[in-house]
Amino acid sequence: MVAAYPNQLSQKLAPLPVLVLLWGEDAGAIRQAAQTVIAATGVDVTDAFATEKLTLNDLAANPARLADGAQTLSFTSPHRLITLSGISGDERADT
């Protein structure tokens, strides 16, 4: 596993790693880093076959959904983009 600060992210994306996990306290920096990763993959974010959006509640209801989504092959792209939202620690899952 390779760790990188946001200002080093572009150099760490060549070649593109199998998995990129972004985490941090600064939501703005995370959004900017996510845009850098998305641009590096070339995935069309409007392509339903290449992208999947999950929330904290989705994962609480079905924890295997993240692994299933990561293992799903895209029909239209060599990469798969899974975005997680609501994962800041302040939200509570409806359990």
Image (cartoon, helix red, strand yellow):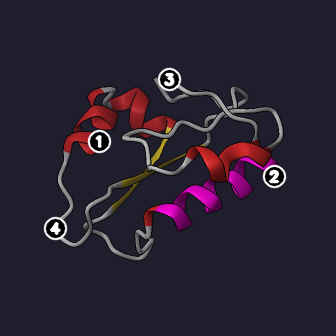
Disc 2 element: helix
Q: What residue type is labelled 3?
A: Met
- Residue 1 or residue 85, whichever sits in front: 1
Numbered disc total:
4
How far separated are the C-alphas under marks 4 and 1? 14 Å
Q: Residues within 10 Å of mark 3 (few under 14, many from 20)?
A: few
Q: What residue type is labelled 4?
A: Phe
Which mark, residue 70? 1
How far separated are the C-alphas under marks 1 and 2? 25 Å
Residue 5: percent from left, percent from top:
75, 37
Is label 3 or label 4 in front?
Answer: 3
Q: Which of marks 1 and 2 is nearer the N terminus?
A: 2
Q: Are marks 3 and 2 in contact (CB under 8 Å)?
A: no
Q: In this view, does 58 lie above or below 63?
A: below
How far separated are the C-alphas under marks 1 and 3? 17 Å
Residue marked by disc 4:
75
- Magenta-highlighted residues: 29-40
